[in-house]
Image (cartoon, rainbow, N blue to C red):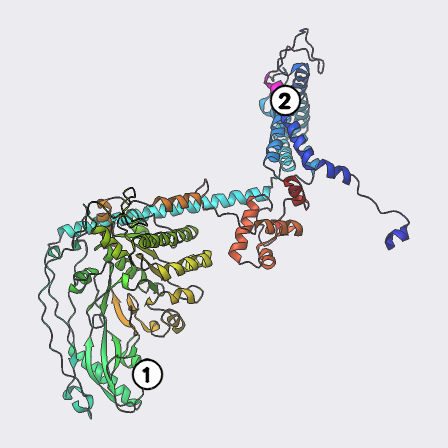
Amino acid sequence: MSATTRRSGKPPARRKGSRWSHILDGPLVSEALTLALMALTALLLISFLTYNAADPAPVFGAASGRRGVANAAGPLGAFVAAACFQLLGLAAYLLPLGTALAIWERLRQRPPRPRRGTSVLGMGLLLWSGAALLHLVLGTAASPAGRSPGGLLGSETASGLVGMVGSVGAGIVLVTLLLLALIFSTRLSLQSTAGSLGRRVKSTGAQGRLAWARLKEQHRRRQIQRQAVRRQLNKERQPPRPTPERTPIVLRDTDLPEGRTASAAASPPAPTPRRHAPPQPARQLTLPDPPGDYSLPPLTLLTPADERLPVDEDELKDRARQLTEKFQEFGIGGTVVSIHPGPVITTFEFKPDAGVKVSKVTSMVDDLSMALQADTIRVERLAGKATIGIEVPNRQRETIRIREILEDPAFMDSTACLPLALGKGIDGKACSTALEKMPHLLIAGATGSGKSVALNSMIASILFRASPDEVKFIFIDPKMLELGIYEDIPHLICPVVTDADRAARVLRWAVGEMTRRYQLLFKFGVRNLEQFNRMVSGAGKEGLRPTGKDGEVDPNSEPATKQPFLIIVIDELADLMMASSKEVEASIQRLAQMARAVGIHLIVATQRPSVDVLTGIIKANFPCRMAFRVSSRTDSNVILDQKGAERLLGMGDMLFLAPGAATLKRVHGAFLEEAEALRLIAYLRKQGKPVYNKEILKDEEEGTDSSGLPTLPRDELFDQAARLVVSMGQASVSNLQRRLALGYARAARLMDSLEAEGIVGPPEGSKPRQVLVPPDYFEEVDNTHF
C-alpha cells in the first residue's frame, strides 16, 4: 500500500469501464460489430428503397387501411422507413451512408477512434442539420412520406431559425452545423485540408508552368533547327580551306634583351614544317558504312571550321622580352628559347640558368600575369625537356569546331570502336582518344566551364561513327537540362532518366546486364566483347551456338547475337549521391571495376567536385579524368590529385589525364552548337525509332504507383519505427535518426511510409507529427495475427 493510500484511508480508485472497454475493443467483438453494421446497412437500404406510403405503419398519426405490406423488409422495415422519412425526410438516406462509411473504415483496418461519443454526436448533428438544410433549400417539395423534404425535424428546425435570424442567417447557421458534424464524425481537419488543398494547387501551378516552359523550349529549338537548315541549304558547299600548321618561333640574338646571347638561350633548331595535302570536301570524307539499312550522319550537318587567325610574331617576341625582364627583376636568370602559338594559348619555353629551382619560377605566376596583363597564367615543367612552359592566353582565341576534329586524319583513320573527339592541344593539333581504352571517364568542373558542351561533343563523335546495333546509350540527367534533347534517337536502350530513384534502379539493371554478359562470354570461352562479336560474325549463316559437355553443338539452342557496346552517361553525379549515395556508389563501383571486358563504359560528370560526391571509391575506379576550370585549388586536388585546374581559362579549357599517361595534357575542347546538335538528332530520328529494353521498362513500371510517382519497397525497419513512434506518442524525422541511427533520407522515407499507412498525421511545420493510433494499437494487431 502506498503512502497516499495510507493517509487517505481509501482504496485506489479503479478506472470505470476499463474491463468492459477492453472486451468491447477486442478483435472478435470488432468483427461481430462489423457484420452487424453490414446487416443494418442492408436492411436500411432495402426498407428505404422499397418504401410504400400505403403500407400500414402508423407513425405520427399517419395510418392506412391497407393490411398487406409491400416493403421488402417486412412490417418492421415499413415502420422504420416511415418513421425515418416522416422525421428526417430525404436526410434519412444519410443513415445507411454513415453505417457504410463505418464499415469501410473497419474493413480497411483503420485504427479505432479514441472517442466514440464524438462520432455518435457528429452523426446525430449531421442528420439534424442535413434535414433542416433540405427543408430550407427545397422548400415545399414532397418527400416519400408526403411531408417536407426535411421531415418533421427539419421543417420545425428550419422554421424556427428563419423566424429568428432570417433565411440567409439560417443557411449560415445550418452550414456551420453541417461542417461541425463532419469534423466530429470524421477525422477531417480544416487546417490540414486547407494546407493539403493549397499544396495541391501550388503543385498543379508549378507543373503547369513547367509544361509551358517545356513547350516554349521545344518551339524555340524547332525555330533554331529550321533557321539552321535554311542557312545550310542557302550556303554554297565549298571545300574547307587548307590551314597551314603552326610552327614554333625561335628567338635569335637580335630578339633577346640586351645582355643576352643566343649561346645562353641554347635554342633548338627550328623544325621543318611538314606539308600536308589539302583536305578533301566533307562529302568525300565518308565513314565506313555500318551493317544494315542504317546510314551514318554526314559531316555536312556540322558547321565548317572558322578561318584561322594570323599570328603576330612581333607581339609574341615582345611578350617574351617582358617575361625575361620580369624574371631578371626577381633575380632569376634564364631566357625564352622558343614560342609555340596555339589556338587559345601561347606557350613560351623558358630555360633557367644553372642553379635556379623550378619552384622559384612557378611561384611567380601572379607577378607574370600582372606583367603580361593576362587573366591567368599556368606554369608547368615540360616533360622530356630542360625547359619550363609558361602558358599565356591569346588576346583573341579561336573557336574550335567539332567538324574540324572529325575531319582530322587522326580521327578518321582511327580503328577505335568508341572514338571521342576532344578538341585541340596547346600546339593546335587535333586531340582524340578511345573510350574503350580508358575504360571510364570522370568529368568535373564549375558551372559555365564548358563541361556540358564537351560532353555533347563526345556523344556526337560516337554517333557519327557507330550505328544503333553497335552502340547503345543510357542517359541519366537529373538536372533535366542537357541530355533531354537526345530523346527518341535510335541509339537509346531506355528513355532519358531524370528521376534520381529511377536512375538508381537503372544502374542496378546495368550491374545485372554486366553479370549476364560475363556468363555469356564464359559460355563461349572468350575474354572480352570484341572477341565475342568477331566470333559471332565469323560463324556464318548457321550462327554461333554453345557447345555441351561432350563438346558437340546443341542444335536446339538459339544462336548467339552480337552484343552492342553500352555507354552510361551521367550528367550530374551530385544529385544522385544526394538521393541515394550508398546504392549509386555501390553500382558505379561494380560497373567501373568489372564492366570493361563486357563493353559497358561510364561517362560521369559533376559540377560539384567535393569529397562527398567524388569519394575515394569512385576516384579509384576512374583512372581517366577530365578537369575543367574550378574555383579553388582544393577542388582541383579532389579531381586530379594535384593543382592546376583553378588556373584554366574556362569555355572548354581542360586538363586531361589520358589512359596510361603519368602527366596531364591541356586540351581546348571542341565546340558543338545547339543548332548542330539538333540537326544531328533530327537526322538520327529519321533513321528509325528506339527499341527499348523491356526489362528496364518492367522494373520502372513495378517501381511506380497508379499516379506514375515512384514508390519504394517497404523498409525493413518500418515495423520498428512504427512501434517506436506509437510508444512515444509523437513522431519526427530527427527522432527516428537519433533512435535508429539512420541518415536523413532513410528516416524521411520511413516517416512518409508511416503517414501513408495512417499511423502518423501530416507534417505541421516544426512541430512533431501527431500519432493517430492509440498506445495499445500494436497489442491489438499482435492479438489479431495470433
Q: What element does badge 1 sit on? A: loop
Of 113 and 111, which appears nearest the observer?
Answer: 111
Residue at image x 40%, y 61%? 589
Q: Quadrant of residue 457?
A: bottom left
Q: Which residue is mark 1?
A: 364
Of 226 and 415, which appears nearest the observer?
Answer: 415
Left or right: residue 211 versus residue 488 is right
Where in the figure is residue 413, as x and y percent of width and height? 16, 62
Q: What element does badge 2 sit on? A: helix
Earlier sequence position, callout 2 versus callout 1: 2
Q: Which residue is mark 2?
A: 44
Q: Which residues are magenta?
A: 42-61
Q: How many marks?
A: 2
Camera sees residue 723:
yes
Q: Is residue 731 placed above or below 629 in the rendered structure?
A: above
Amino acid marked by disc 2 = Leu
Of 226 and 403, which appears nearest the observer?
Answer: 403
Q: Is residue 409 magenta?
A: no
Q: Is residue 52 magenta?
A: yes
